[in-house]
Image (cartoon, helix red, strand yellow):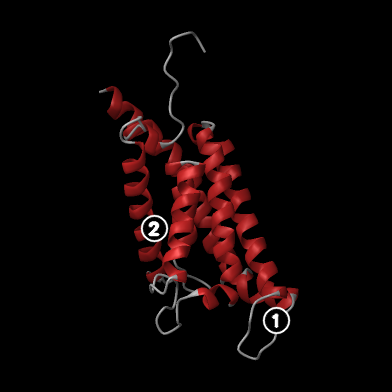
Amino acid sequence: MASGTTPVPGTLAGLLWPAGERNGLLRAVVLAILGSALLTLSAKVSVPFWPVPMTLQTLTVLALGALLGRRLAVATVVLYIAQGMSGLPVFVNTPPAVPGPLYLLGPTGGFLAGFVIAAAIVGTAADRGLARRPLAFLGVVAAADVVLLAIGCLWLALGAAMPSGAAGIGFAKAFAAGVQPFLLGEALKVALVGLAAPMLWRGAQRLVRG
C-alpha cells in the first residue's frame, strides 16, 4: 500500500458508516442493538421449507459477520444471547419455552454458542477483505456454517438437558434430529450470504464513490 493511501474497509458497515474517534462507541452500540433486534426477528420467522420449516437465524448470523466484521458481529450475537439470558423472549419458541440461563442448557444451547463462532469466522474474513471475492468468501461462509452445526450437534449429542432428564441424545439421533433435516436450508442460506455480500459491497462502493 502506498504511503498516504486510505485503506479500503472490508465490511459494508465500515464502508457506509466508517468508525471514527468521536462516533466509534455510538456506532458500535447502534449497530449491535439493530443487529440483535434483527436476530430476534429472524428467530420468530418460520419459513415453509422442505423437509422442515426453517428460521432465518443462521442466515442472519452469517450476514452479520459479513456486514459488521468480527468484533462487532460477535458483540451483537453476545448481546442477543445476553438478552435471552436476562429473560427477554428473544429465542426460538419463547414463549412457550421460558427464556433465561436454563434455556442455554437445552437442546438449542449449542447452536447459540455456534452463532458466536460462526460470526467470528465470517467477520474475520470480511475484515480481511474476502467479502469482495465471491468464491473465497462463499467457502468461508460454508465453513462457518459447518462449524456452527457441528457445535450444535455435539452439544445436543452429549450435553443438552433433555425433558427426560438425560444429558444429550447421542450422536446418531442428534445428527438425525438437529442437523440432517436442515442441510438443504443451510446450503441455501450459505449461498445467499456468500454470493450476495460481495455484490452488496460492490454496489455500496459505487454509491460511496458517487
Q: Is residue 151 visible?
A: yes
Identify which amino acid the numbered label 2 is placed on.
Answer: Ser
**Left or right: residue 15 compared with residue 104:** left
Where disc 1 sits, the SS reads loop
- What residue lies at 51% left-to-right and 35% top-to-bottom? 127
Where disc 2 sits, the SS reads helix
Q: Is residue 59 visible?
A: no
- Nearer to me, 174 or 123: 123
Of callouts 1 and 2, the N-terminal one: 2
Q: Tally the marks.
A: 2
Tell me residue 62's x, y (percent): 49, 51
Cβ–Cβ under 8 Å for marks 1 and 2: no
- What residue lies at 60% left-to-right and 43% top-to-bottom? 139
Q: Is residue 129 above or below residue 120?
A: above
**Left or right: residue 196 compared with residue 29:** right
Tell me residue 149's x, y (percent): 62, 62
Residue carrying label 1 = 167
Quarter of image, res 171:
bottom right
Tell me residue 190's x, y (percent): 53, 52
Residue carrying label 2 = 36
Q: Residue furthest top?
A: 3
- What residue lies at 66% left-to-right and 74% top-to-bottom? 156
**Left or right: residue 107 compared with residue 210:** right
Q: Is residue 71 above or below residue 169?
A: above
Query: CA–CA distance between discs 1 and 2?
Result: 29 Å
- Nearer to me, 162 or 149: 162
Identify which amino acid the numbered label 1 is placed on.
Answer: Ala
